[in-house]
Image (spheres, rainbow, N blue to C red):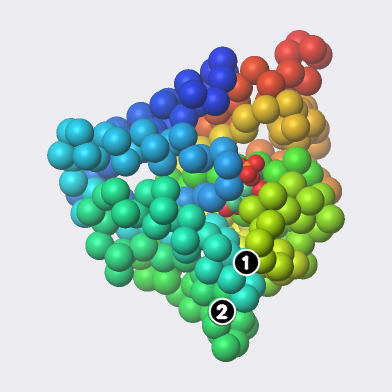
Amino acid sequence: MKLIAVSDEEELSRIAAEILISKIKTSDRLVLGLATGKTPLGMYRYLSKYSIESKQSYDHVHTVNLDEYVGSQAYHTYMKEHFFQYVDIPSEQTHLPNGEADSLTVECKSYEDIISNLGGIDLQVLGIGENGHIGFNEPGTNFDSRTHVVQLTESTLSANAKYFIDTNQPKKAITMGIGTILESKEILLLAVGERKANAVKELFKGSINKDIPATALKVHPNVTVLADKGARSLLDKES
Ligand code: F6R
């Protein structure tokens, strides 16, 4: 696992965007796995700005998002608001799990089919939960799991409660499985702030264990972690 140490969220956002832009510019076709949440917001800002200012087309990019809440379109809305509205990726090339599907079992299977029909994910962007989750794969999730429905933990619900002030916060989500994520050809994990420091420490110094889902990434051959000072604070103390 490669660690790129950055000073703050701004630098992290810029470097993450530069990594994606270099792939976008050098590929004829690119399947990007995308994350939501607070961490990638700045990266989406840079990617959108670059597309507008440079006139670089993103029309050869296909996207598959990690997750969506059950009974909600929250992450569909997020992606339109923060990224898709600014770029020329055809909407039929953007994919998120449908949390409002009649059958969530069928939806999970179809989502796996979408990813495999695309030929897999070239580069998957991940955030990390305070409890070490990736996607919404909470502690205890099997490392060979595929897209499935999860019951969110209290830690995740309270970390994300701020986004649901006016509406009921869903307690369940559909997420790509850890097995699905691990099949991506390349993974870029973004970590910002001291609240992520323990999860980042476990990722680099801990053993591979289901209690910290991100430790599954240790078996992947091509993972880059971009972490700011806060997220590295427990690593630096020990080294
Ligand atoms: C979001 C996702 C989650 C977040 C994680 C960190 O699509 O899959 O794993 O990346 O919860 O969220 P933030 O960035 O809000 O701290």
- Work out whether mark 1 precedes mark 2 in sequence or the reverse, and give the earlier one: 1
Residue occupying image coordinates x 71% and y 64%: 169
Cβ–Cβ below 8 Å for labels 1 and 2? no
Q: Is 179 left or right of 212, judged from the image as shown? A: left
Toward the front, the furthest residue is 166
Picture disc at residue 15 = none
The kind of residue tagged 2 is Glu
**Where is residue 200 shown, x and y percent of the image?**
71, 31
Write down the residue under mark 1: 69
Report the residue marked by disc 2. 100
Residue at 79 percent of width and 51 percent of height = 158
Query: Is any atom of residue 185 visible in this view?
Result: no
- How far apart are labels 1 and 2 at the CA level? 9 Å
Q: Position of residue 151 (x, y in %)?
A: 77, 67
> Does dot 1 land on a helix, a strand or a loop?
strand
Pick the front one: 206 or 7? 7
* Drawn side of residue 129 relative to residue 124, left or right: right
Q: Residues within 10 Å of mark 2 (few under 14, many from 20)?
A: some
* Category of crowding for the residue at label 1, using alpha-carbon neighbours closer than 10 angstroms: few (below 14), some (14–19), many (at least 20): many
Q: State which quadrant residue 219 falls in.
A: top right
For the residue labelled by badge 2, is the local secondary structure a helix, a strand or a loop? loop
Q: Would residue 114 be found to the left or right of residue 26 on screen? A: right
Name the residue rendered at 54%, 50% in the picture: 36
Residue 179 on image: x %, y %: 61, 59
Picture coordinates of residue 60 (x, y %)?
23, 54
- Direction bottom: furthest residue: 102
